Every structure is written in C-alpha cells, then in structure tokens.
Image (tube, rainbow, N blue to C red):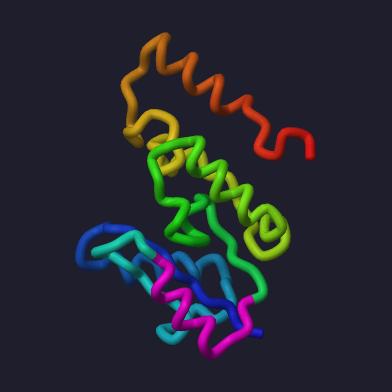
Amino acid sequence: MEVFYVTSREQGERTYEYAMEHLKVLGAPYADKEHLTVLRDSSNKQPRQEQIAQQFDVVVYLGDNLNDFRRKYYVKNVDQRMQAMEADREQFGRKYVLFPNPTDGHWMAAIFGDSEPPASDANRQLFRKAATRSAWDGR
C-alpha cells in the first residue's frame, strides 16, 4: 500500500518545498518526490488522480472539500453540488472521506458565489440555511 498526496496551492516559488517539509515534520508516510504532487497553476486534481489510478488500485480519497474527489463538484450552486453528491452517495464514507476544514473557502463559494462573502445579516441567514440542511434527508 502506498500513499499519494495531491494538493493545489500557491505559496510562491517554494510551494513544493513547504508542502514536503510539512509532510516530513508530520512523519507522513511516502513523503517523497514520487508521492507528492503540488499543483500551483490549477486546482483540478482529477488528471493526476487518474494517472495514479492507472497504476494503483485507489482505496480511498481523503480531502477537505468535495472538489478534492472529482471535478464535477466544482460548481457554485448548492443544489448542483447536492445532486452530484446524491449521484455518488454510496462513495461517501467509503471511497470519499471528507475532513472538515473551516479555513478553506471553496465550499463557501457554493453558498454565496464567493469564497469570502462580506459579513451581513442576509449572508448569515443564507449560511445558517445551508449549514443546517441535511445532506441525505434522513435516508
């Protein structure tokens, strides 16, 4: 079994070095050039995931955002994201494991159309409505 890390971030010229240093400090397995991919020009991880899947039987995808699993989730509409999740319902908790990350704003864009919406009563109400919505409607 091997672990691959596919991340998309932009922290300047040393972005790759920073990511590798973090993995090593954490004692993460397979913290080497063959297992770490850092995308700086795109947030689309799917092409690299597909390359890995051609050589390995991928057991699980871990991510802090739906976009980490498949590009089809990269939409700015809560209902569209919910429909895409519903289509992959059996994958969640098995193939796709989502880790909450309150510092990542991509999920906010699905609610507001912007990953850093202004603070307002209207936005707080919209956020509360989205945050209290049941993903699977009790099924």
Which of the 4 image quadrants contains residue 30? bottom right
Q: Is 48 covered by the magenta stretch?
A: yes
Where does the image place residue 68, in percent across and percent down from the top left? 48, 59
Residue at the bottom extreme, as displayed: 55
Q: Residue at x 58, y 86 (%)?
A: 56
Relative to the observer, which residue lies in front, 64 or 57? Answer: 57
Q: Residue at x 33, y 31 (%)?
A: 116
Q: Residue at x 59, y 49 (%)?
A: 85
Where does the image place residue 93, in percent across and percent down from the top left? 71, 56
Q: Is residue 119 left or right of residue 100?
A: left
**How many badges with numbers are in the image?**
0
Vertically, is 59 above or below 97? below
Residue at the left extreme, as displayed: 13
Where does the image place residue 20, in percent across and percent down from the top left? 41, 72
Rendered-image quadrant of the C terminus: top right
Tell me which segment is drawn in magenta: 45-58
Rendered-image quadrant of the N terminus: bottom right
Q: Is residue 112 left or right of residue 130?
A: left
Dominant SS of magenta comes to helix
Vertically, is 56 above or below 45? below
Q: Residue at x 56, y 41 (%)?
A: 82
Residue at the top extreme, as displayed: 121
Q: Is 65 covered by the magenta stretch?
A: no
Where does the image place residue 120, in percent across and percent down from the top left? 37, 12
Which of the 4 image quadrants contains residue 110? top left
